[in-house]
Image: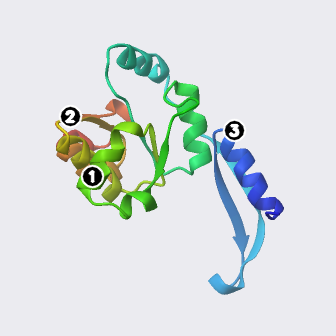
Amino acid sequence: ALPIYHQEKSYMGSAGLRVLALASGPELGQMTFLGLVGMMDPPRIGVKEAITMLIESGVAVKMITGDSQETAVSIASHLGLYSKGSHSFSGEEIDALDVQQLSQIVPKVSVFYRASPRHKLKIVKSLQNIGAVVAMTGDGVNDAVALKAADIGIAMGQTGNRLEEHTS
């Protein structure tokens, strides 16, 4: 059986919480586990309605996040992006494929989790490789390269930083 903290991490992630482990000690190899903290970081107001409108208009919407699988799937489910039969794919799995191989899988995937800026760029390129016109939103410096590569880069307004405003 998994240790209790793994079970709790999964439970909190499945509730849509971002989970942080806390530890204390003089150096990395001598840390003592203190506990877990779950933080709520809900989607912005209006996102669910916007996603519904896009899907109803025939747009294929993908969620790309650095969050854990449990957290990503929970949030995507709440937004209407993920339901029974949907697929999620990790950054680690993306690393194992080239753009051509990823292009065969991307249409079937709703949620990409544990994704880095490098993974975001590879997803954009794989979608473009199959002829998709790619629009991407971003709100952090980690989105800048993929925003620039997308056919349409959308900085997230007041919360987006100057780099996103410049690249899009």
Relative to residue 109, is residue 26 depicted above or below?
below
Q: Residue at x 83, y 63 (%)?
A: 1
Residue named by callout 2 = 132
Residue named by callout 3 = 15
Residue 21: image quadrant is: bottom right
Residue 110: image quadrant is: top left
Q: Residue at x 46, y 19 (%)?
A: 46
SS at mark 1 in the image = helix
Which numbered disc, 1 or 3, marks the residue that appears first in the sequence? 3
Amino acid on which the number 3 mark rests in the picture = Ala
Give the percent coordinates (x, y) of residue 24. Answer: 72, 74
Real-space CA distance between mark 1 and mark 2, rounded to the nearest whole angstrom: 14 Å
Would residue 121 be found to the left or right of residue 19 on screen? left
Amino acid on which the number 1 mark rests in the picture = Leu
- Residue 149 seen anywhere in this rendered image of the structure: yes
Q: Nearer the viewer, residue 164 or 57?
A: 57
How many neighbours does mark 1 have within 10 angstroms: few (below 14), some (14-19), or many (20 or more)? some
Q: Nearer the viewer, residue 65 or 101?
A: 101
* Residue 121 circle label: 1
Relative to residue 120, is residue 76 depicted above or below?
above
SS at mark 3 in the image = loop
